[in-house]
Amino acid sequence: MITVLAHKSPDTDATGSPLIWAWYLNEIRKTPARAVLQGTPNTEAAWMLTRWDRDMPEIVTDIAAGEQVVICDTNNPAELPPGINDTEILEIIDHHMLVGGLKTRTPINITIRPLACTATIMHDLIGDDMSAAPDWVRGVMLTCILSDTLQFRSPTTTDHDRAVAEGLAAGLDIDIDQYATEMFAAKSDVSAYGDEDLLRMDSKEFELQGKKLRVSVLETTAPQVLLDRKLALLAAMPGVARADGADEVLLFVVDILNEEATLLVPNDYVRQVAEASFGVPVAGDHVVLPGIMSRKKQIIPSLKL
């Protein structure tokens, strides 16, 4: 049995891509496979599972030594189970920068492409066999692409991502504007989540000059709902950093419709990072960053002191 998994703090692509590839392995390659998650999916990903009538995959915290795995939507060991290098990695499918640190027992297939979404890459790899894909596979692919591209607003969007999404939507008779509005409404409904949960919901680990950062992004069409919780989120940051072995938490609230991000600024260190990274003066406990939408393309590559 092959285990298909993505990164921690599963967003829509990290929830959907394991399901897509497990379907492909089971139904097309006739190889037993299962999709798993490394945490509770965010609200948009949970909505996707309900919308396309998929059960929640099993949540795992580690993988047994010798287990066969396919890794998707990451190639970073810090975002994978602790025992990942003791497993038999069969394949990596990803759209992030190459980090290094993974070990394989034999040569493997590695597909890393400069596209906005892992599901777009999987669509291409599946190729002509997409004709056998049920509606739920096509629907999950569409949801992943619209999520990762923020309905084509993100600077990571390519013409190919858009073309694949539009083709999937046409085949499913889905209006992209209406569907994306439903998706983003689900993404923006975080009322059931505590402050610590929000800080971890969609986060990546990053090291900056010896300091370990948890870089968190919350994408929403209702940013004020999150900004109304600003003081509580700022107060929760030190505890989350300590518990997660980080030095600082950077939280970016991305306003999907206005195409800007608000960075919360809890202390002088984050202020210095914000000013050096984005070239803006910071006078209070937050700063608005016009045009900043993508952690992968605009935030992580810009971070400096």
Image (cartoon, rainbow, N blue to C red):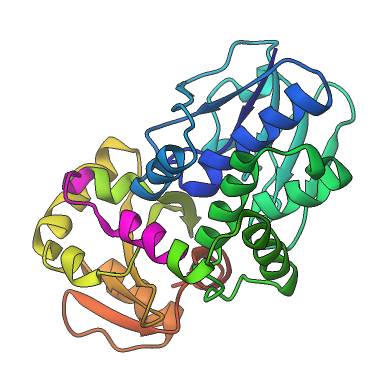
Whether residue 242 appears in this view of the structure is: yes
Q: Compared to 288, does 140 lie above or below?
A: above
Segment tinted magenta in the rendering: 180-196
Figure check: 13 above or below 113: above
Single out the residue that lies furthest toward the front: 173
Residue 16 placed where, x, y %?
56, 41
The part of the image, by quadrant, that contains residue 83 is: top right
The residue lying toward the viewer, choosing from 281 and 57, is 57
Q: Which of 295 and 45 is in front in this view?
A: 45
Asked if residue 212 lies left or right of residue 248, the reply is right
Task: Give the total of numbered labels.
Answer: 0
Question: Does residue 74 sit above or below 116 in this rendering?
Answer: above
**Residue 89 in view of the camera:** no
Residue 80 in percent (x, y) is at: 55, 33
Splitting the image into 4 quarters, where does residue 268 fall?
A: bottom left
Q: In which quarter of the image is the N terminus?
A: top right
Residue at 12% in and 61% down = 229
Image x and y of residue 193, in percent: 20, 44
Q: Which percent across, then down, holds residue 131?
A: 81, 43
Between 193 and 174, the residue placed more toward the observer is 174
**Drawn side of residue 118 relative to residue 263, left or right:** right
The reply to whether the magenta stretch includes residue 45 is no
Horizontal arrangement in the rendering, residue 84 relative to residue 276 (left or right): right
At 74% across and 22% down in the image, what residue appears?
26
Q: Is residue 181 left or right of residue 8?
A: left
**Could you tell me what secondary structure mostly forms the magenta stretch?**
helix
Residue at the (82%, 45%) spot, across then down: 125
Q: Quadrant of the C terminus?
A: bottom left
